[in-house]
Amino acid sequence: MDNLRHQDRTRQVVVAASALIAIVGSFVGSGVLFGTPINRAADGALAADATLVAPGTGAFQIWGLIYLGLVAYAVWQFLPAQKEAGRHRRLGYPVALSLLLNAAWILSIQFDLLWLSVPVIAALLVVLVVAFRRAVETRSAGAVDSVVTDGTIGLYLGWVCVATAANITAWLTATGFRGAGIAPEVWTIVIIAVAAAVGIVIATSGRGRLAPMLSLGWGLTWVAVARLGNGLHSTPTAVAAIVAVVIVVLATVALRVKASRGSRPA
């Protein structure tokens, strides 16, 4: 029993320390205190007008909400009532790893290692998928736990889906890839379609959970905003992004209603 309590305490400290590292990384990535803002680092490869898949600058405001949720989770899992909760024993280390990978991604961009950012963000996506599945498989302790734990992980996952697509596209563009004879807008529409398909898969596995849909939809909406702006304009891309958002929202709501009806007593 003492050994298990020690393991719980170690996990809690690791999650809290990882959250602190991620917060410091966010300050570096934003350029508030030091470092270069992400949209200007790596020769501007991740700027809002660098590729057709790049979201508008306003999209990154969601990080404030995600970081707030992650800090709240770090505090929440420290509470005595949550210390020995089975779901946090399953979720703690994946969440901690996601925070460290997020910091590693920021560092890779800060050091202009765009190629390294691709496997890092891919690993981050995989870890978040694991965390999301574990959150779905374990019972919430109540409304607060649902918001702090499930809501935060869901928002994080949905946004990273969009960020991964934008990151890979930025790296390919930086390497000189020009579409292999296929028009850039065709490639972009395919990528957006894949993002929408991923959103539907998440909605299905999560039984209509709203948080991933909200952040994925947020990211794709800002792709549309950026393509309708004065930068890298593309009406077909904007239309595809808007259609993708509508499809993901409708699919998520439908699955949530279905899950809700299925949980009612006969």
Image (spheres, rainbow, N blue to C red):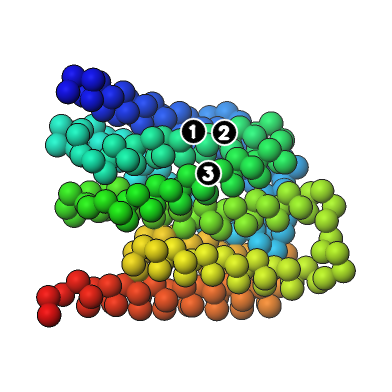
Report if the CB atoms under discs 1 and 2 are less than 8 Å apart: yes
Dot 3 amino acid type: Leu
Residue drawn at x 20%, y 39% as measured from the top left: 85
Q: Marks 1 and 2, how far apart in space? A: 6 Å
Percent coordinates x, y for residue 187 in the rendering: 73, 68
The residue type indicated by label 1 comes to Leu
Which residue is identified by label 1?
Answer: 100
Instruction: Name the image quarter holding residue 181.
Output: bottom right
Q: Determine the secondary structure under disc 2.
A: helix
Disc with the residue nearer the chain's start (2 vs 3): 2
- Crowding at dot 1, Cα within 10 Å, few <14 / some 14-19 / many 20+, comes out as many
The disc at residue 104 is 2
Q: Position of residue 185 (x, y in %)?
A: 74, 71
Mark closest to the chain's N terminus, 1 or 3:
1
Name the residue rendered at 81%, 71% in the picture: 183
Crowd band around label 3 with a 10 angstrom C-alpha radius: few (<14), some (14–19), many (20+): many
Determine the CA span between mark 2 and mark 3.
10 Å
Which residue, given by chain and number where applicable, does mark 3 sit on? 124
Percent from the top left, x then y, of residue 240? 61, 76
